[in-house]
Amino acid sequence: MSAIDHNDADAQFSAAQTLWRQNRVAESEALLRRLVQHLPQRDDAAMLLAEVLRSQGRLNAACHAVFSLCRARDFDGEISFRGARFIQECQRQSLADGICDVVVARGRASPALLAVAGNIARELGDFEKARARYLAALNAGVDLNVWHVLGALAHTHRYTDPHDADFARFTAQFNNTAYSARSRAATGFGLAKACDDVGDRNQAAALLREANALVRSDLPWSDVAWRTFVNSRKTERVVRLRNGLHESFIPVFVVGLPRSGTTLTAAQLARSAAARDRGELRTLRFVADTLINGRHTGNSAAITEAAQLYFTHSRQDDASATWYIDQDPLNFRYLHLIDAMFPQARVIVCQRNRRDTALSLWSQDFAHTDCAFAYDFASIAGYVEGYESLMRHWERSLAIPMHTMRYEDLVADPQATLAQLRKFIGAAEVEGTHAAAPIASASVWQARQPIYATSVGRWRGYSSCIPELAEFPE
């Protein structure tokens, strides 16, 4: 194959872009592969190739393309920053962590890369490394309005000393009005967690009030819009697939209110069964928005295409399995679509004491706007009401198998509870220790700890300083 000069390369890259926009994926990939073979340092071609591969669910191949670019550019700081973030989004944190390690070791890490490196290490459960990366980012002058490093730092270990230097770090930034409200709130949630660790619940509650108020000033939530959303789902009719699609593929959806134990349940189930944990897979949200907003729920061809897309992005290009766990708790909003696309699917519904759930929601800084209700107790109550109403509707109207699991049962008797879950999905217990999947959700710190029961009834310790908790049923 002849070499490619730069003028020809520009023309071929432009052609690949056009083919990509026309959805001529195979042709675009072929052109891009030829480009990166001859010009491995060309970042636009390598990154577009990675996007093309990711769109097909070929995440291993996509990450390999990005890693090859980083290596060809001798782990340049900016290219490696972009590459590590892309690979992190693909849930290949170990590979992203390796890139960060090389850049840090060569002294090329920007403050932003150090912050990303801390997040990646934390998602892998390496809290000691995460802490070191976050402290390095702080020492390098990371922009705290962009990277909420202090809030993340608080979730790298359990505090035992109220005089720990971190308390002063957190307090100084939280009280500094030169920072944005959102940045200060993130640190406030972290400081509250640290105060809770050392048993100062009154101070933790006071900090949480202020942090939640700061977020509410920046992130609106509409109770009316939520009620409208719930009522709209109840009236939708979705055409079911007549013929089974990928019947040997069994998606397992772990749903429930956020902070009801979905992450812990998915992680424990995946480790005790031959199941692939895909984390909080966002594909169903995309599929649902496309079908519902486009008014395609009655179109069998559109439902088939959506099912194929979900299968592709669940299956991916790593070792195959039968059970694929999607632990996005908010998938409860679209169980009618799951029922139509995958009648062989299984739905695990996590339940937890409502007061413990409300406290946990109010204590957590979430990364996405879908949880904007969590910063106000009245909005939490309204969200819970809508959730329970929609779940009752699904139970009456859908044929898909559902199994309710109480969080309290899981922490009290994990072996028996997991055995029930395996029986429900049809999986046998797998002996031995299995590598834990990365956890990128808000529950990363809690889900990485040994199963503990101290979170059961935790609201009682806050009942005197957060009287709103009494308004929720136990």
Image (spheres, grey):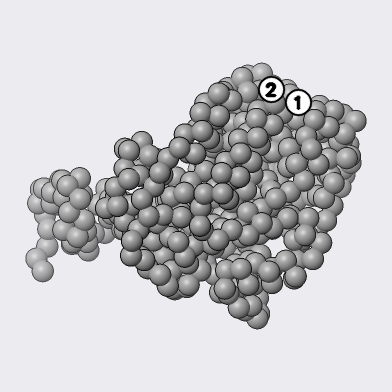
State the image coordinates of residue 394 (x, y, percent, origin top left): 55, 48
Task: From the image, tell me which residue sits under label 1.
Answer: 209
State the image coordinates of residue 119 (x, y, percent, origin top left): 58, 49
* Element at label 1: helix
Please state the total of marks drawn on the protein image. 2
The residue positioned 41% from the left and 65% from the top of the image is: 315
Residue 349 image-quadrant placement: bottom right
Pick whichever, 463 or 307, lies toward us. Answer: 307
Under mark 2, the amino acid is: Ala
State the image coordinates of residue 152 (x, y, percent, origin top left): 65, 42
Pick whichever, 45 or 358, lies toward us. Answer: 358
Pick whichever, 411 or 426, lies toward us. Answer: 426
Q: Residue furthest front?
A: 396
Mark 2 and mark 1 residues within 8 Å of each other at the beta carbon = yes
Name the quadrant of the C terminus: top right
Residue 299 located left or right of residue 323: left
**Which numbered circle lies on residue 213?**
2
State the image coordinates of residue 85 (x, y, percent, origin top left): 46, 49
**Which numbered circle lies on residue 5?**
none
Q: Is residue 115 something that shows in the picture?
A: no
Q: Is residue 400 something that shows in the picture?
A: yes
Label 2, residues with CA under 10 Å away: few <14, some 14-19, many ≥20: some
Residue 321 located left or right of residue 172: left
The residue positioned 55% from the left and 30% from the top of the image is: 226
Residue 214 image-quadrant placement: top right
Give me the C-alpha separation between circle 2 and circle 1. Answer: 6 Å
Under mark 1, the amino acid is: Arg
Label 1, residues with CA under 10 Å away: few <14, some 14-19, many ≥20: many
The residue positioned 65% from the left and 30% from the top of the image is: 382
